[in-house]
Image (spheres, grey):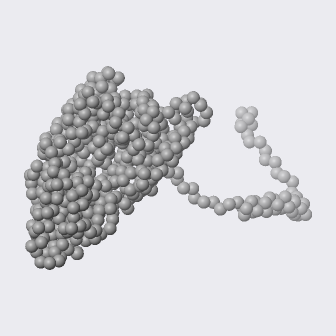
Amino acid sequence: MHRNFHRQPPRVTPAPRSAVATRNMRASSASRIAPARRSVVVAVEDAPPIQASRPAPSPRVRGAVGEALPIIALIGAFFVVNDIRSWLTAQYWGDEAWVALSVRFPLADLPVTTSSSPIGWSFLLRLVPDIDHLRVVPLGFQLLTVVAAYFFGRAVGRNRAHGILIGLVTGLVVLLLPAQQIRHDLKQYTADAAVAVCLLALAAWTEQSWSRRRLAVVVAVVFAGMLVSHTTAIIAPCVFGGLLFAAAVFSRNWSRTVRTAVAGLAAGGFAAAVYFGVSVRADNDAMHGYWTSYFPTLSSLPEYLVARISNLLPLLGVPGWLLVALLLLGVLTLVRQGRPGTGIAILLVPVVATGLGLAQIYPLLDLRTSHFLLVLTAVVAGIGVAGLADLVAMVVRRGRPVVVSGVICALLLSSYAVANQRWWRFDGDEAGLWRNHSAVTTIGSATRYVATHAGPNDIVVVAGPAWFGFALYSDDPLELVAPISSTVGFTVGMPNRPNVVLPLIDPAGGARSIQRALDEILAKASTRPPGTQVWLIRTYTHPSEPDWRAALAAYQVRSVTSGPEPVVVISRR
């Protein structure tokens, strides 16, 4: 029984079929299967071709593209808004000519020829191969200011999208700022603005994530900035003062406070080394006297500030009341976004600038030397625009907040752009708007015309303010003469051009002093062969021009070239 329990069940063998039954069954099966096979074939033929799937870009690649696109857009807009051709083709006016002239002397003379320009700025000019295109250097720093303003806003945002939005706003405000359109001159003022914005952007970046490495970067930029911008010595103490206050008071992190203090001392040491090693040479009595009207006293300070701010306000492109509101919102936004040190640094900048003006160390609210203050004002106002948009988005509470903020920012920026559209592609001379010296200077054309047409016995008289421009555009060898008592501290001689005369004129003597000098020159010309002419080249934008016009009324004057600064031939009546 045990064996039967494990025995397999018996296999059932089907009954044999007849041949006819087998054929009928196969035919029936074939008829059922055939339609299915045809439908499968049709389905395969109608299906789209199979393609190999492409791998999606990695998050790192998408992030890099997202970060690069706003910067590329700002750079492209820069070349749309600015008239680059007028920058690079305008001739150098008086205060630019001596800067450009420094590149014609050996590198060993750079400590002398750099004069009041930062030595790094003068060195950068030497890297430009064509002396007629030296303005590519201020052009580059102005572009850097726009990009730095973007990174400033980018470092303020609470997240990536918000940061990009604020960065675009600040970058576009700086790009559209009217004050930027008139800073085409060959001086370091665009570098002043670029370094100032960079340092404040680095302050916000440091507060974003504190580290010794980031503090070291700020110190390094201070050192590099001092080589191209004197105003680095104004911004750097404000930046480290703000970071130090934030670390000690807001964060109460004593380790961070000590590190910030050490970094600030290091930056101060570097700045002092550059100033006392190079820059202090340009600090002379003549330069101090030139800026006297921009050194207010404590009693005249309120009246002075009102007058200067009223004069500069049109170059900011917004009404005063709106500007004040946006500045307050900008500082509050910085604090609200966790950047209190940067906000304090911004508040310290006007305090330090005013103190230096009262101490007669640095001109206060001059259009050129305070250009960096105008740009910083625009940057903070841009952050204020973004802060205002955020507040409106909080009140509305519809849709994604960053999208609502973006729409509001776009509307406000569009209004700003339309209100200041006359400044777009400004070529330096717009009737009823502004006139730059470079747009009305033809010293280069005048110099070349006289070199071609003056006879061997002719006398070429060059007025003092036009001397550097005449020497720059002449092809003759130059001789450096230094030191001398002047704002620049040096002059040049032309040993191979004895027919060129630089008359010695007493500035206090006015028209009478000019007439005495011209009488002597005309008397000398009368002793030369018949047909000798006396040519006069001068710059028409200098404050001494009214004296020249009054003096020339006593002579016969014949213009031989056209343009805003024609060359004239003078003779006795």
Residue 309 drawn at (x, y percent)? 36, 37
Q: In the rendered image, which quarter is residue 466 located in? A: bottom left
| Number of marks in the rendered image | 0
Answer with left or right where residue 21 lies relative to residue 244.
right
The residue lying at 30 percent from left, 34 percent from top is: 304
Kindly give the residue lying farthest to the bottom in the view shown: 530
| Quadrant where the image shows the N terminus | top right
Residue 254 against residue 211 in the figure, above or below: above
Residue occupying image coordinates x 45% and y 40%: 318
Query: Which one is nearer the viewer's eye here, 24 or 312?
Result: 312
x then y, percent, for residue 395: 57, 29
Q: Is residue 488 above or below residue 568?
A: above
| Left or right placement of residue 237 versus residue 495 in this view | right
Residue 336 lies, in percent from the top left, at 43, 28
**Is 560 situated left or right of 407 in this image?**
left
- Residue 76 visible to an observer of this rendering: no
Residue 312 percent location from the top left of the image: 36, 41
Of 125 and 86, which appears nearest the observer? 86
Q: Quadrant of residue 93?
A: bottom left
Q: Residue at 33% of width from left, 38% of height from top?
A: 308
Which of the 4 image quarters holds residue 22? Answer: bottom right
Rendered residue at 34%/36% (across/down): 307
Whether residue 425 sits left or right of residue 392 in the image: it is left
Q: Quadrant of the C terminus?
A: bottom left
